[in-house]
Image (cartoon, rainbow, N blue to C red):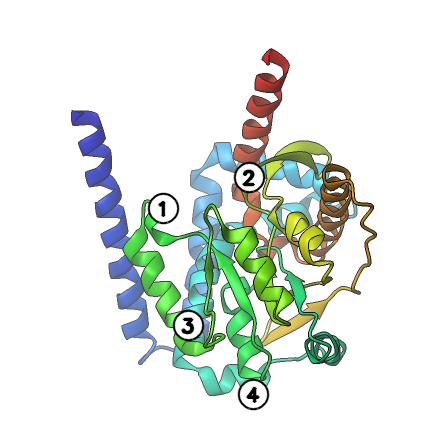
Amino acid sequence: MAASKRIATIFRMVDATFLGLLNLVRFLTRFLPPQTFLAAADYIGYAMYYIRPGARKYILETMRESLPDVGDERELVHIAKKAFSAPIKSMLDIILMERHLGTVMDRFIVNEEAIALYDRETAAGRGAIALSPHIGGVGISFSLACRVGRNLTPVAIDPQNTPIPRYLRAMAEISQKLGCDPDVPVFWTGKDTVAKISEHIRRGKCACITFDLAGGTVADFFGRPTAIASGIAHIACDTGAVIVPGYIKRNERPLEYQYVAYPEFSYTLTGNREADVESVLNQVIEIGETLVRQAPEQWIGWFGLRGWRRRAEKILQDEMKA
């Protein structure tokens, strides 16, 4: 009991610290240019790379396996250092867009083919599934879409189910103010989430869904069994909606984002639910790996991969015992 109280107290302190940092950075954006914050994120990332030898070793080993096209060890180290700053930049994306909204939208590079596909599917009343791994500006992806007139509802973890609810709730509120579907701003993950999203898409709407999260389905991801979320495959089987892969890439120029689209992929449903889910999920994973390899330094999933693989080991062990 005492240990549980201590843990709860620590989480509250962490939550308060994150919330305080969020408000401090929002205040400082009034006086400091975006480059200052982005440079600070890089320096913090580099520092974390050196002071966390265990994480550094694991990420380098994982990147060697996952990024076969990167043969130069120096380039791999550079990518790893940048990856350590990716979670910080994900927070900054939202804060900087709030402060520099006009500039962000002026510099936003839209993919016209993706826009045309969105318009085609919604005009036909079919809806669509936007597949977006946690790469680059994933936290502002739906806001950018809404700002160009294409409503997109993201799926997110309910802040109340995390150790930092106040911080995440504050971030969600900022994101929604920047742009969201006024009818359905967000789907919080939960027991009925798949059914709600499927119904949303059947009404001709679009939802932004990812797969690179801890889940209960074991599949090969970057060559190893990994426990990931399979909701996108279930929703595809429920709706038959087109899946449009892509991500918001941060370009070198500050405040410049680009929607990088991957060609839509088709899938055939056989009526065998288990086989269909597995088939769609495998296609999603294959494309997800391709997208990550395009911008590995901007993917925040490197830091969760070890835990997802350990979870997969436990699931497989439990299945063998049963």
Asked whether, in this view, residue 158 is left or right of residue 17, the answer is right
- Which mark sits nearer the N-terminus, 3 or 2? 3
**Can you say whether 255 is above or below 59 in the image?**
below
Q: Secondary structure at mark 3?
A: helix
C-alpha distance separating marks 4 and 1: 36 Å
User: Residue at point 50% right, 85% down?
Assistant: 103
Residue under the point 66% across and 58% down: 295
Where 320 falls versus 114 (above or below)?
A: above
Q: In the image, which is nearer the foreground, mark 4 or mark 1? A: 1
Identity of the amino acid at label 4? Asp
Counting residues from the start of the chain, the first of labels 1 and 2 encountered is: 1
Whole-percent x, y for residue 183 in the image: 47, 74
In the picture, which quadrant includes the C terminus? top right
Q: Secondary structure at mark 2?
A: strand
| 46 horizontally vs 224: left or right | left
In 3D space, how far apart are the residues under numbered discs 3 and 2 (Cα atoms)?
A: 26 Å
Q: Residue at 43%, 82% (x, y): give it.
A: 100
Q: Which residue is mark 4?
A: 106
Q: Residues within 10 Å of mark 3 (few under 14, many from 20)?
A: some
Q: CA distance from mark 1 to mark 3?
A: 19 Å
Q: Which residue occupies the extreme left position in the image?
A: 2
Query: Cα distance, mark 4 to mark 3?
Result: 20 Å
**CA–CA distance in space, label 4 to label 2:** 37 Å
The residue singled out by tag 1 in the image is: 161
Q: Tell me, for residue 176, which label it has, or none.
A: 3
Mark 4 or mark 3, which has the lower sequence index?
4
The answer to which of marks 4 and 2 sits earlier in the sequence is 4
Name the kind of residue labelled 1 in the image: Asn
Q: How many marks?
A: 4
**Residue behind mark 2:** 215
The residue lying furthest to the top in this view is 321
Is residue 20 something that shows in the picture?
yes
